[in-house]
Image (spheres, rainbow, N blue to C red):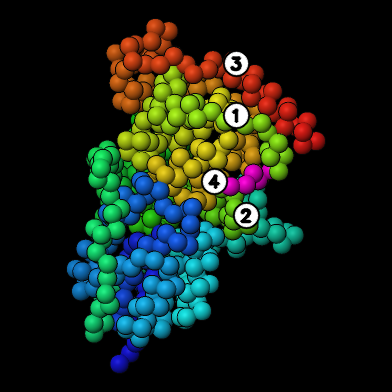
Amino acid sequence: MTSPTIVWLRRDLRLEDQAAFAAAAAAGAPVIPVYVLDDDTPRHRRMGAASRWWLHHSLAALDTRLRKMGSRLILKRGKCDAALAAIRRETGARTVQALHHYEPWWRMAEKAVAKTFDLQLHHGNYLVPPGTLKTGGGQPYKIYTPFWRASQQHLPPPKPVKAPAKLEAPSFWPASDKLDDWDLLPTKPDWAGGMRKAWTPGEKGAAARLKTFVDLASRYDATRNLPSEEGTSMLSPHLHFGELSPAMAWHAVSDAGGSVDVFLSELGWRDYGQNIILQLPDYAAKNGRPAFDALPWRHSPKDLKAWQQGQTGYPIVDAGMRQLWHTGWMHNRVRMIAASFLVKHLLIDWRRGEQWFWDTLVDADYGSNATNWQWVAGSGVDANMFSRIMAPLSQSEKFDAAGYIREWVPELRKLDDAEIHDPENRPKGYPARIIEHGDARTRALEANATMKRESGK
């Protein structure tokens, strides 16, 4: 009998435009789809709580679709190489089909699996395969603008490939864990009510979200910065978990006209983050610019907690942090404001913020999260200047965040648009500003001067 082929799944939980499934189906051998919950290889980079909630529902959705095709999803827990080796002993499988992943722990896992199997890796999670683009000197790009310019030579991406019509089932299925036994869902307490209301994980939910965005894409540049409006795609968790390929998103919206190119460049920024972690695997823990090692960060658990809980006294910041806690997601403009506030107003190390987002975001992507935080902090290889300090009160008014604040900061709901961004009389239960903007700016600029003096830069 023909030995079965394993399709090893990670952040690619789809059947549409999924090269590993396509290759396995084309080979004609029985196919065993496998997801391994590997918390050992990533170590401290194991998925955060919000991502684990999403993973549970995404795996359940994929298994449902596979069963309609006469297949199923096999679940294993442990190190990937050991878990897949156990399936080999049960079934005789010798080939593993999978998509390339670029997080350092997944690259380590791929090397380990390749020692036992014929591991065949395919592209498909990014517009242009990370590591492809080089400068004239043969080096990978570190700056986004020339990186994106070079990407244009490889775009548009190939047209998406339809899901296989059939996956040949093996003569018997290997043992599988039960999804509920993984305890990915919160129970005591169950804090995921807001996420259940906001999201539908899985390919079906991704397709619905994409369909909605197609009608908005032409106005993307005009609306994406307005948190009170439906202007962003909200595709990020679906892209992160691979329920939707970037090629599918590109081809769905690329003819929308208007400012859709701005959205397409955001897909390019997602590619850029992967190229950075391919060059700098510890980018979420180490400053891209060594001079920032001399910046005198404050250690203030009290201020950090106030930021995490949305109790800073700055309405736009607090609205964003509460939205994050409730839904596992935050509007992109507000992410920048909230991140800048932590780093520059509170002078707390960007890594504390990165770690909080890692645990609370349903779209917590290693490359994007690290790249975005280092851009805001000014510490990245391509970053905003530290001395450019966002003023959250004026940002709130500029981007018309009144409705957004009313939704997420109910203490301020009765205030009118002119007052809600910076209420002079604080309603009962809403805190005073944790620090005044002018004082925060002075302190941040002094820290910046100290860094330059200490680092010699």
Give how far across and how far down residue 435 sits, in percent: 53, 17
Q: Which residue is mark 2?
A: 280
In the image as oriented, which residue stretches furthest toward the right?
456
Residue drawn where x is 77% and y is 37% of the image: 455
Left or right of 344, for residue 207: left
Q: Which residue is mark 4?
A: 370
Count of picture labels: 4
Q: Is residue 127 above or below residue 445?
A: below
Q: Earlier in the sequence, mark 4 or mark 1?
A: 1
Q: Earlier in the sequence, mark 3 or mark 2?
A: 2
Callouts 1 and 2 close, C-beta under 8 Å = no
Q: Amino acid at mark 1?
A: Arg
For the residue pair 287 and 19, the one nearer the viewer reads as 287
Residue drawn where x is 60% and y is 16% of the image: 439
- Write the start and end of the magenta stretch as one range: 285-289
**How far apart, in angstroms, are the residues tagged by discs 1 and 3?**
15 Å
Asked if one can make out residue 252 in the rendered structure from this viewpoint, the answer is no
**How far apart, in angstroms, are the residues tagged by discs 4 and 3?**
28 Å
Callouts 4 and 3 close, C-beta under 8 Å = no
Q: Amino acid at mark 3?
A: Asp
Q: Which residue is mark 3?
A: 439
